[in-house]
Amino acid sequence: MMEEPRAHRPVLLDESVAALAIRPDGVYIDGTFGRGGHSHLVLEGLGEAGRLIGIDKDPEAVIHAQEAFGGDGRFVIERGSFAMLAAIAAQHGVAGKVDGILLDLGVSSPQLDQAERGFSFLQEGPLDMRMDPETGFSAADWLMGAEAKEIADVLKTFGEERHARRIARAIVAARQEHPIRTTRQLSEIVSAANPAWEKGKHPATRSFQGIRIFINRELEDLERFLDQVLDVLAPGGRLAVISFHSLEDRMIKRFMRDQAKGDRFPPGVPVTQAQLNPKLRLLGKAIRAGKAEIEENPRSRSAVLRVAERLS
């Protein structure tokens, strides 16, 4: 029987929605609808002429959106990845007219809380890890067929796991004895193989992160999203992105910084600010959760919110 997830308040909820500077008649996109925490707050700021498009690849999130907001004519939910941003915006006739886009990256608390989704190393469940369980392959299926080098590369690249090769060898050895089908099996294998447990962090944290990011192509989706976002935002439109690990944050920081600098010219060539043609303006420094929020939700400790505004 499916466990009912606890009520989920998104990390940096007030800060991220405030960063969008909601206009009553504005058009907004919540690229990671989840359980609708951000969307609910955005809708509170919209008038009758406002519009909000939610996007989520998780079918459970889409069902929740339809149940929670289905009667609100200002809102529509699209099932898919935020990497489909441009196509979804064009479908709704808002390409180049969007006043704010919000992303809250990574796995959501409801997904972690449901053992049967296979994201958590703290609960026993099938080793799945797919945000959309109807597409792609599960973590269990991939681990059964991948070579040790491929596993190690995933753990190191996406999990930033220093002991990736050692853990990968342990996974391959273990699967020769028994198929690795549950989160607890994988957690125990990784924990036993990890020689250096980080203080305050479960020894399987990085490995689970790496496998999840790989299975869901999370960094590929983010790169595709960033390639499209300038064509979707209206002049003055804002982009707010919450990330939870350094790989994502580096991508976002680099993108915003590069677009704020503008076009590149050879060294020594005199150019004006107008000729540089910057596409974004950075709005303040990175925002992190305060002490009270961290105490309430320890996951918020690693959250980083970055905000930028589209220039004309």
Image (cartoon, rainbow, N blue to C red):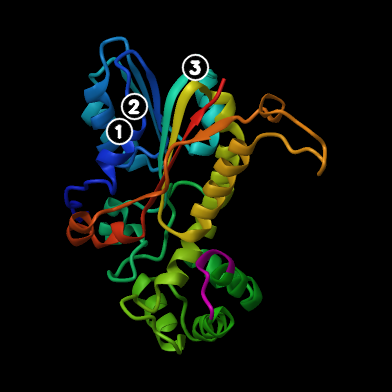
Which segment did they paint magenta? Answer: 157-162
Q: Give the spatial CA distance, label 1 vs label 2.
A: 5 Å
Which residue position holds label 2? 21
Q: Specify whether residue 138 is in view.
A: no
Query: Mark on residue 97?
Result: 3
Quadrant housing the N terminus: bottom left
* Element carrying mark 3: loop
| Viewer-side residue, 18 vs 55 | 18
Q: Position of residue 82 (x, y in %)?
A: 49, 37
Q: Give the spatial CA distance, label 3 vs label 1.
A: 19 Å
Which residue position holds label 1? 18
Above-or-below relation of 306 to 189: above
Q: Position of residue 131 (x, y in %)?
A: 42, 50
Dot 3 crowding, Cα within 10 Å, few <14, some 14–19, many 20+: some
**Label 1 amino acid?**
Ala
* Element carrying mark 2: loop
**Label 2 amino acid?**
Ala
Q: Position of residue 172 (x, y in %)?
A: 56, 81
Q: Specify whether residue 205 is in view.
A: yes
Dot 1 crowding, Cα within 10 Å, few <14, some 14–19, many 20+: some
* Element carrying mark 1: helix
Q: Position of residue 141 (x, y in %)?
A: 52, 65
Above-or-below relation of 42 to 142: above
